[in-house]
């Protein structure tokens, strides 16, 4: 789009090797920025060199956390094309979060144009090995210099890019998960189904406690009865019980509507699996294990894609799932999803958008 200004960096950075890629530690040469004010709306869209910017210590986001973000990925597919996976769904979800956090909505067409332009400029930053990608992080922060508690009148919107490998150190090996009934991530009526930064701040303390006990992440239960499963760490969660694929339903509004979650449900249904979106208690999960019906557990998310769960600890009752090994469904779904993303499998649902 012609009104997106572009200022090219004078000092391009060295790109990391594929094998040194972790998650979110390296950033590309440029970023997209635009500003919001009440009189001008969202204005001054521009792509500029990635770098620090000056802010006031009184800026509202520092004090009251009015901030939202998204996470999506671009891939270099087997033909060498740069593609993005379901980008319009992420942009739509950004606006869903914006509304809930009293942040003015963005023009989705403009953001899509901006993202395409930024990815074209940064195409050499998309790594080329399977399992790697360019993680795209759009976010909005409240910028008013003011200590009164109210929605800000000014905002900044950014898109930054980071070449990444696996999210968890375990890679695609199963992770060990600690079920907490002491802390909660989100309650009904709260922010749980938005990508508010506050949800991630709320998760840190329990995650650190779990880590001290030797667990990678926390499995969250509902805030009211502490019995029903909600999410795992920064991911949605799935259970293979008997012949069904079960995942918590989104009805209560405290669970994030994950785009990888939605993709797994759609693909599983297309393949003829029985999918149940419903309430599922942690008791049911442990009973299914006792009865030999719990075949697999896995998390889904943009960053981690599919993360098999090999162990659950609930009040010191420890169960090993699928002998602590990656299950065949998780592996099949990982291959299917990444196959679509890297262009090895046909994209029958039109999820992949070619950038250049
Ligand atoms: C994602 O999967 O993109 C997420 O948002 C998780 C992130 C907090 C690492």
Image: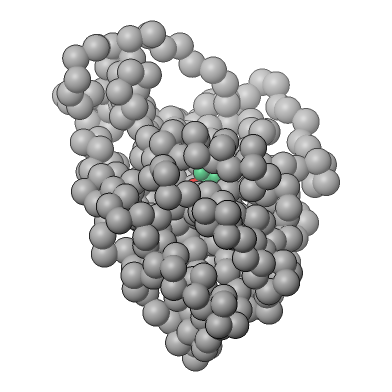
Residue 20, placed above or below residue 67: below
Q: Residue furthest front?
A: 316
Quadrant assignment for the N terminus: top left
Evaluate whether residue 269 shows in this view.
no
Q: Position of residue 246 (x, y in %)?
A: 45, 76
Q: How many numbered discs, if any?
A: 0
Q: Is residue 44 left or right of residue 275?
A: left
Q: Quadrant of residue 78?
A: bottom right
Q: Is residue 283 left or right of residue 226?
A: right
Instruction: Examine the rendered structure and indicate whether residue 56 appears above or below residue 240.
Output: above
Whether residue 111 is situated above or below residue 15 in the rendered picture: below
- Which residue lies at the image location 53% right of the left edge and 86% below the top edge? 242
Is residue 117 or residue 94 the one in the foreground? 94
Judged left or right of residue 145, residue 354 is right
For this rendering, which residue is in front, 102 or 179? Answer: 179
The residue under the point 32% across, 63% down is 250
């Amino acid at each position: 789009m012609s009104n997106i200004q572009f200022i090219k960096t004078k000092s391009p950075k060295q790109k990391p090797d594929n094998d040194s890629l972790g998650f979110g530690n390296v950033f590309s040469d440029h970023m997209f920025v635009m500003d919001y004010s009440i009189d001008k709306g969202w204005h001054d869209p521009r792509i500029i060199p990635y770098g620090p910017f000056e802010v006031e210590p009184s800026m509202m986001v520092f004090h009251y956390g009015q901030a939202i973000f998204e996470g999506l990925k671009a891939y270099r597919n087997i033909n060498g094309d740069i593609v993005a996976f379901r980008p319009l769904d992420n942009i739509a979800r950004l606006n869903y979060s914006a509304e809930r956090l009293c942040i003015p909505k963005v023009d989705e067409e403009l953001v899509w144009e901006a993202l395409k332009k930024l990815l074209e400029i940064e195409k050499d930053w998309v790594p080329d090995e399977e399992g790697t990608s360019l993680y795209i992080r759009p976010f909005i922060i409240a910028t008013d210099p003011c200590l009164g508690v109210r929605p800000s009148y000014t905002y900044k919107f950014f898109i930054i890019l980071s070449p990444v490998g696996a999210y968890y150190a375990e890679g695609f090996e199963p992770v060990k998960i600690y079920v907490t009934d002491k802390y909660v991530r989100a309650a009904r009526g709260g922010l749980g189904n938005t990508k508010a930064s506050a949800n991630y701040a709320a998760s840190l303390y329990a995650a650190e406690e779990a880590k001290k006990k030797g667990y990678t992440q926390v499995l969250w239960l509902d805030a009211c009865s502490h019995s029903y499963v909600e999410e795992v760490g920064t991911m949605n969660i799935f259970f293979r019980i008997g012949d069904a694929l079960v995942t918590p339903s989104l009805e209560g509004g405290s669970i994030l509507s994950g785009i990888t979650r939605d993709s797994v449900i759609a693909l599983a249904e297309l393949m003829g699996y029985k999918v149940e979106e419903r309430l599922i208690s942690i008791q049911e999960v442990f009973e299914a294990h006792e009865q030999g019906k719990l075949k697999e557990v896995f998390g889904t998310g943009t960053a981690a894609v599919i993360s098999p769960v090999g162990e659950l600890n609930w009040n010191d009752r420890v169960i090993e799932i699928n002998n602590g090994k990656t299950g065949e469904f998780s592996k099949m779904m990982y291959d299917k999803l990444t196959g679509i993303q890297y262009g090895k499998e046909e994209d029958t649902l039109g999820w992949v958008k070619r950038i250049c």
